[in-house]
Image (cartoon, rainbow, N blue to C red):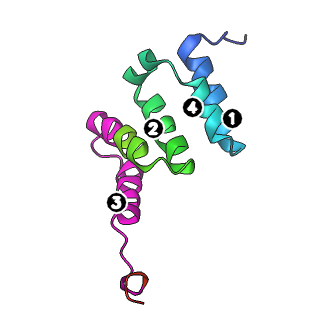
Amino acid sequence: MIKKMEGTEYLILMAKSALAQSKAAEVMEILQDSKLDDNSEVLYLKGEASYRLQNWGESINYFRDFQSKNPDDKKAQAYIEMIQNILTFYHKDHFNP
């Protein structure tokens, strides 16, 4: 017997499918309801979609919210570190003509 999916479960499945197809903007549309942010899986998906859209501040906020609920998650920590590296990148030759 197939179990019928309900609200959040269905939206998460749709968002994962869109992310697998590299449709990050679609993921954000699917998960746009802020009521879903209580779900840590939704936070992670939003963080990953924002990362792919290069919305660094938004992405790091989602990953930090996710990490507050899942402190031992290494993937979220890796994303946070990557974003911090992107934001703090400095190349001295770009400023020396």
The answer for how far apart the CA atoms under marks 2 and 1 are is 14 Å
What residue did someone put label 2 on? 44
Residue contact between numbered discs 2 and 3, judged by CB atoms under 8 Å: no
Residue 19: horizontal and vertical position, in percent?
Answer: 64, 40
The mark lying in front, picked from 1 and 4, is 4
> Are circles 3 and 1 on residues that touch, CB within 8 Å?
no
Above or below residue 69? Residue 31 is: above
Measure the alpha-carbon separation of dots 3 and 1: 27 Å
Query: N-terminal of the two: label 2 or label 3?
Result: 2
Q: Earlier in the sequence, mark 2 or mark 1?
A: 1
Q: Specify which label sits upstream in the sequence, 4 or 3.
A: 4
Image coords of residue 67 (percent x, y)? 31, 41
In the rendered structure, the answer to whether residue 2 lies left or right of residue 27 reads: right
Q: Which residues are magenta?
A: 64-93
Would you place residue 77 above or below residue 15 in this image? Answer: below
Asked whether the beta carbons under mark 4 and mark 3 sit within 8 Å of each other, the answer is: no
Q: Identify which residue is drawn at 54% across, 16% down.
A: 8
Q: Which residue is mark 4?
A: 28
User: Disc 4 marks which amino acid?
Assistant: Met
Residue 51 x %, y % = 50, 49
> Residue, x 68% and y 35% (percent of image)?
18
